[in-house]
């Protein structure tokens, strides 16, 4: 399968998941779901540039990266629905999916706070002489928040093996009239500005990751996407023009994905809620005495 | 066994833990070549080098964020925040990230780290070098909070905290750093988290105090003993999770409880201790549960000895509660 086709497949999956979850959220069946904001192709391209031993620190909008890392739709949807089959025990806000097996770190609800964590993990890998690198994903708005600056500054100091990929879409959030990439330069971090063409992103991240693994330090990549022209649709048109598939094959593929998504949603809801006790799981390695008392108190409420 | 102060005891615990486990790293502002603002990490950089004793930029949020990432990777970071007052730029990383890392990942990711920071007043440090923010962290699920009062406990508790699989706030009472010297074993040992200690036995009033205020409570206890009131003084050592049993057992004997702490009164940890004891031992009370705390003002520079709940403020309260 060509790289562009792989990108399309994962990105389409993320888009269809978004569309379905948006309906479920509006209908009150799930709490919320932060969508990909038409950045799926860039997110997937960046994630596909990684090797198996590399790590990704996504935001809560980056489930497309999880799909690219090999997470199947059913596991992701089990998390969003938060039922008995949720690998995160119904504890995480929808979108904040993580998995150690695929080296996907827990996203944060606090905009840029995953970035210093990503830098710390990359730094640890270097200190432990492990030649893996870290990909940190962020939207343009996160580049205005404090931890972005902390992370890029620390990365500039430590030469940690990390690649920051900022997707910019010309949103109207108030921001100084400078390129995000320039903020990397300010902290001594090599920065480049690429088009939102997913193949450009893939190539840029691949090169930056190679540099990082060779011990040459961090890179900040600004990937410009244009939301007026749906990037996913552009990739689809390109693949059709290239003869990768025709409209009918694409429709068939979509239908298959939608069936897979629907089946996963039904299964996740059918599994029911997680056990009541799971509310107290994983607060700390061992339940403290106060938590044992409170769990017993909760059990009593439901016994009577 | 040699005589050590708390600075030496903490330094020794760090050194021994770093020798025992090569995943343990120390990071923070000037912790390396300088050896820390209070010299607590002195000599570690010379012994363990740049990769394990790491000078960072002056950015507390960055330090704790980085430590979370290191912990997620499988290391055991021990970040130092120069003063507990400087922890607030890292507050979001501690309460929104470190504290919840295990919980919101369904146990997939953990955050074993110990945030060491000097706490408390009495060194003419003013508002930015004197505060006691323990209650803010006790209020946050997922964190353990430790505050040793002496060199022996500091060494054992720090080793236990580093070996713990969850984030621990380790508050070191800076007024005690060099003021107290005692016998501390030279070899490695741990003092279990979550276990308090009766420092002075007595049958009339239970007094709970920690850190530097323990000494004020003990001094006040000696004063009121001359008037026939015997205090049982308890050092919880680990503030959270609290060793509630040791406190309630004592209160069920004495019928009276006083909590002393430096932090302001409103929503201070004393309120929680008293309420927990009230829920369990209400029928044993012979006097109103009482707090002696810092005032609900910002920490002052000039009149800090009038802000702190020192012995001269504790004595009259103990007499009042004892004679109630």
Image: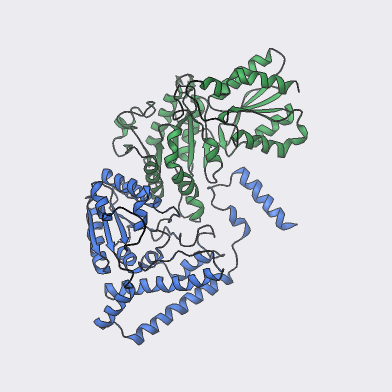
In this rendering, the count of numbered labels is 0
Residue B205 in view in this figure: yes
Q: Position of residue B158 (x, y in %)?
A: 47, 33
- Residue at 67 percent across and 34 percent down: it is B274
Residue B195 in which image quadrant: top right
The colour scheme of the drawn protein is by chain
Q: Position of residue A93 (x, y in %)?
A: 50, 59
Q: Is residue A130 left or right of residue A261?
A: left
**Residue A64 higher or lower than A129, as above or below:** below
Location of the C terminus of chain B (image quadrant): top right
**Residue B246 higher or lower than B304, as above or below:** below
- Residue at 37 percent across and 54 percent down: it is A142
Residue B251 in which image quadrant: top right
**Residue B143 higher or lower than A9, as above or below:** above
Chain A takes which shade in the image? blue
* Colour green belongs to chain: B
Q: Position of residue A116 (x, y in %)?
A: 36, 48
Q: Position of residue B60 (x, y in %)?
A: 39, 39
Residue B230 in view in this figure: no
Q: Is residue B250 left or right of residue B118?
A: right
Q: Nearer the viewer, residue B304 or A252?
A: B304
Q: Nearer the viewer, residue A275 or A17?
A: A17
Farthest residue in the bottom direction? A248
Q: Is residue B235 left or right of residue B67?
A: right
Q: Is residue B56 left or right of residue B304?
A: left
Residue A226 in which image quadrant: bottom left
């Amino acid at each position: 399968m060509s790289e562009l086709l792989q990108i399309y497949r994962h990105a389409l999956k993320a888009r269809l998941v978004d569309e379905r979850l948006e309906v479920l959220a509006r209908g009150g069946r799930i709490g919320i779901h932060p969508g990909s904001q038409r950045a799926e192709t860039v997110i997937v391209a960046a994630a596909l540039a990684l090797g198996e031993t590399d790590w990704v620190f996504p935001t809560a909008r980056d489930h497309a990266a999880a799909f690219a890392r090999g997470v199947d739709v059913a596991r992701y949807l089990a998390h969003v629905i938060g039922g008995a089959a949720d690998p995160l025990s119904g504890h995480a806000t929808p979108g904040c999916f993580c998995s150690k097996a695929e080296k996907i770190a827990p996203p944060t609800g606090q905009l840029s706070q995953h970035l210093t964590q990503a830098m710390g993990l990359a730094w640890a890998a270097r200190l432990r002489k492990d030649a893996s690198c870290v990909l940190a994903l962020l939207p343009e708005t996160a580049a205005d928040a404090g931890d972005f600056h902390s992370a890029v500054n620390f990365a500039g100091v430590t030469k940690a093996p990390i690649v920051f990929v900022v997707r910019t879409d010309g949103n109207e959030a108030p921001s100084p009239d400078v390129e995000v990439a320039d903020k990397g330069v300010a902290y001594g971090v090599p920065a480049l500005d690429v088009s939102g063409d997913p193949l450009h992103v893939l190539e840029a991240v691949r090169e930056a990751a190679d540099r990082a693994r060779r011990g040459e330090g961090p890179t900040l990549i600004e990937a410009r996407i244009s939301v007026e022209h749906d990037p996913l649709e552009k990739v689809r048109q390109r693949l059709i023009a290239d003869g990768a598939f025709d409209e009918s094959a694409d429709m068939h593929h979509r239908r298959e994905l939608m069936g897979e998504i629907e089946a996963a949603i039904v299964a996740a809801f059918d599994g029911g809620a997680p056990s009541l006790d799971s509310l107290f799981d994983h607060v700390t390695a061992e339940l403290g005495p106060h938590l044992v008392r409170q769990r017993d108190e909760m059990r009593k409420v439901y016994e009577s | 066994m040699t005589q050590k102060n708390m600075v030496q005891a903490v330094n020794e615990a760090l050194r021994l833990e770093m020798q025992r486990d090569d995943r343990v790293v120390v990071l923070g502002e000037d912790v390396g070549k300088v050896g820390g603002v209070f010299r607590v990490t002195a000599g570690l950089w010379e012994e363990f080098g740049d990769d394990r004793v790491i000078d960072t930029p002056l950015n507390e949020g960055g330090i704790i964020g980085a430590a979370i990432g290191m912990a997620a990777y499988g290391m055991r970071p021990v970040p130092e925040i120069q003063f507990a007052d400087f922890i607030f730029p890292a507050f979001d990383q501690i309460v929104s990230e470190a504290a919840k890392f295990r919980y919101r990942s369904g146990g997939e990711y953990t955050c074993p780290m110990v945030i060491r920071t000097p706490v408390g007043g009495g060194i003419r440090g003013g508002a930015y070098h004197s505060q006691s923010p323990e209650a803010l962290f006790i209020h946050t699920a997922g964190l353990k909070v430790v505050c040793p009062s002496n060199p022996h406990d500091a060494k054992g508790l720090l080793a236990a905290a580093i070996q713990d699989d969850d984030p621990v706030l380790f508050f070191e009472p800076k007024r005690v750093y060099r003021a107290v010297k005692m016998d501390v074993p030279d070899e490695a040992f741990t003092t279990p988290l979550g276990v308090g200690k009766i420092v002075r036995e007595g049958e009339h009033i239970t007094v709970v105090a920690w850190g530097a205020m323990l000494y004020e409570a003990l001094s006040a206890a000696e004063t009121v003993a001359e008037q026939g009131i015997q205090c049982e003084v308890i050092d919880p050592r680990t503030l959270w999770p609290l060793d509630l049993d040791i406190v309630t057992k004592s209160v069920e004997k004495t019928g009276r409880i006083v909590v002393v702490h430096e932090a302001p009164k409103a929503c201070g940890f004393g309120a929680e201790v008293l309420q927990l004891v009230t829920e369990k031992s209400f029928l044993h009370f012979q006097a109103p549960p009482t707090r002696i705390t810092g005032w609900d003002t910002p920490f002052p520079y000039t009149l800090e000895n009038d802000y702190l709940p020192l012995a001269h403020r504790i004595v009259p309260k103990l007499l009042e509660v004892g004679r109630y």
